[in-house]
Image (cartoon, rainbow, N blue to C red):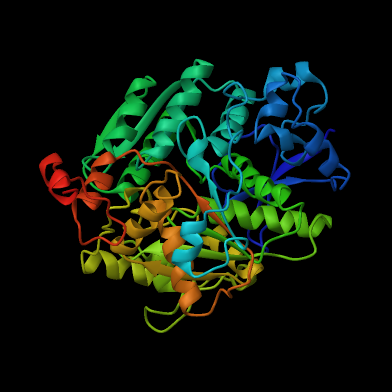
């Protein structure tokens, strides 16, 4: 199935359009862009997607991203022609999204106060680089390949650099990643180095690294693969496709994500807007975005915690002055994002406006949780036999908090997205070495164990 595609500014008062074979981060007036499709996909594709699960050694059917390629066909190919897929679509042998789907976790359900049949958690750590980033990196690198790009660049707290380096090395493309010195999990840094990326350490935090990288990319005409790239957002929509397909395309009441740069928030919102517009879903799930207390810009602004004004999309008429005032306040007070969950340690979310749009469309909510609550969330997921990093621990912690506030009801159907696996074992060890932690399984000396058995 071929689909006419183009890029369009998200500002309702602007709507400038650009061809698909052009790389831009913004329109010429500085507004973010969407990838748009001119036609409405047939709902009969749901059966096609299901049939592709019997992939017959076709890696594009095996892929949890490209299995849904008809809905993200910006390459405008014949999606049933294997040779066309092979020519254009970038995949790590079909591994992206292949194993990621919702799971029931009884211990997490008990922890958050929900029936085990109502709560689903989707571990994106099963992706080949260990995080959700591979969903979007497959599509970003596809667009880069379409443009014959020789070098990609990104700023990262770790997972983006790992994913970008992995896909770039597999495609023979140079990769340069900018990371905040000392604020990246060593496991993630090791991945970037292992996959051959040129790592550039920046004195500062992620927000600093992003600004420096964007400046360097512009001067060197490199292709940026951070989530400000609208083609990366396209791939991350597959996270929602897989969740909905698992539920027979009956939308849950809630989708819950950790909140960092808000790329996932943006992609989920765009996905749901499209599916609703196309008539694929009749109910729109509500988004719940969970910030870390130490990196809570969205929570602060969305809930009117700064100057009493609640920041909203407001049909595109965003109070940009409020955002500027808050960022100036952060600078003046030297407020820097600080949390052990480095994956969401972001003070200036690059996708703030798209995130606001998603929250408005879904009647979403934003909550914050402490590092301690995230540690408990991470640990209880582990006790169910699943792995997740600390930032993903924000999801069960946030669901628990929203249940206690009765925002989420006990019989609501909730799908929480665990965005990555654990790549900093020191966090886990430190948690379990502290016997006072709620879910700690503290190591014991053999001699003490023998005393207890007498």
Residue 247's x, y, as percent? 72, 53
**Residue 108 visible, this angle:** yes
Residue at the extreme bottom = 308
Q: For this rendering, which residue is in front, 256 or 137? A: 256
Residue pictured at 70% horizontal, 48% vertical: 246
The quarter of the rendered structure image containing the N terminus is top right
Residue 408's x, y, as percent? 56, 73
Residue 95, placed above or below residue 343: above
Task: Please give the count of numbered marks on the rendered protein.
Answer: 0
Q: Is residue 401 left or right of residue 73?
A: left
Residue pictured at 76% horizontal, 28% vertical: 54
Q: Is residue 282 left or right of residue 385?
A: right
Residue 451's x, y, as percent? 12, 48
Q: Is residue 72 left or right of residue 292?
A: right
Residue pictured at 65% horizontal, 70% vertical: 315
Q: Is residue 58 left or right of residue 301?
A: right
Residue 361's x, y, as percent? 66, 67
Residue 200, placed above or below residue 298: above
**Residue 31 visible, this angle:** no
The quarter of the picture where residue 53 lies is top right
Q: For this rendering, which residue is in front, 11 or 140? A: 140
Q: For this rendering, which residue is in front, 363 or 326? A: 363
């Amino acid at each position: 199935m071929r689909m006419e595609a183009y890029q369009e500014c998200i500002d309702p008062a602007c709507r400038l359009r650009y061809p698909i074979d052009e790389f831009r981060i913004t329109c010429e007036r500085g507004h973010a862009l969407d990838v748009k499709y001119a036609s409405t996909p047939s709902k009969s594709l749901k059966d096609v997607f299901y049939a592709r699960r019997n992939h017959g050694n076709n890696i594009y059917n095996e892929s949890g991203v490209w299995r849904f390629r008809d809905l993200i066909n910006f390459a405008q190919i014949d999606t049933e022609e294997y040779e066309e897929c092979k020519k254009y679509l970038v995949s790590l042998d079909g591994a992206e999204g292949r194993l990621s789907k919702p799971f029931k976790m009884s211990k997490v359900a008990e922890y958050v106060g929900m029936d085990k049949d109502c709560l689903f958690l989707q571990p994106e750590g099963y992706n080949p680089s260990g995080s959700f980033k591979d969903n979007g990196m497959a599509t970003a690198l596809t667009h880069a390949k379409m443009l014959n790009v020789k070098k990609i660049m990104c700023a990262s707290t770790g997972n983006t650099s790992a994913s970008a380096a992995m896909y770039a090395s597999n495609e023979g493309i140079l990769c340069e990643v900018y990371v905040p010195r000392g604020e990246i999990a060593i496991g993630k840094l090791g991945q970037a180095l292992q996959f051959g990326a040129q790592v550039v350490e920046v004195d500062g935090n992620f927000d600093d690294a992003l600004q420096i990288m964007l400046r360097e990319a512009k001067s060197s005409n490199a292709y940026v693969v951070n989530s400000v790239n609208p083609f990366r957002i396209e791939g991350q929509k597959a996270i929602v496709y897989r969740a909905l397909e698992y539920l027979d395309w009956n939308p849950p009441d809630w989708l819950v994500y950790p909140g960092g740069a808000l790329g996932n928030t943006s992609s989920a919102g765009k996905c749901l807007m499209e599916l609703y517009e196309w008539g694929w879903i009749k109910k729109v799930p509500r988004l719940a975005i969970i910030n870390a207390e130490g990196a809570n810009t969205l929570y602060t602004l969305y809930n009117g915690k700064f100057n009493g004004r609640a920041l909203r999309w407001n049909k595109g008429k965003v109070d940009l002055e409020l955002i500027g005032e808050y960022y100036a306040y952060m600078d003046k007070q030297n407020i820097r994002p600080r949390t052990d969950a480095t994956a969401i340690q972001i003070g200036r979310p690059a996708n703030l406006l798209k995130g606001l749009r998603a929250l408005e469309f879904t009647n979403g909510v934003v909550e914050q949780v402490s590092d301690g609550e995230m540690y408990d969330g991470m640990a209880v997921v582990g006790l169910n036999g699943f792995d997740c990093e600390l930032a993903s621990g924000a999801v069960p912690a946030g669901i628990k908090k929203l249940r206690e506030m009765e925002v989420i009801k006990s019989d609501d159907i909730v799908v929480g997205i665990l965005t990555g696996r654990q790549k900093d074992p020191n966090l886990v060890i430190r948690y379990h070495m502290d016997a006072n932690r709620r879910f700690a399984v503290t190591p014991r000396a053999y001699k003490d164990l023998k005393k207890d058995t007498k």
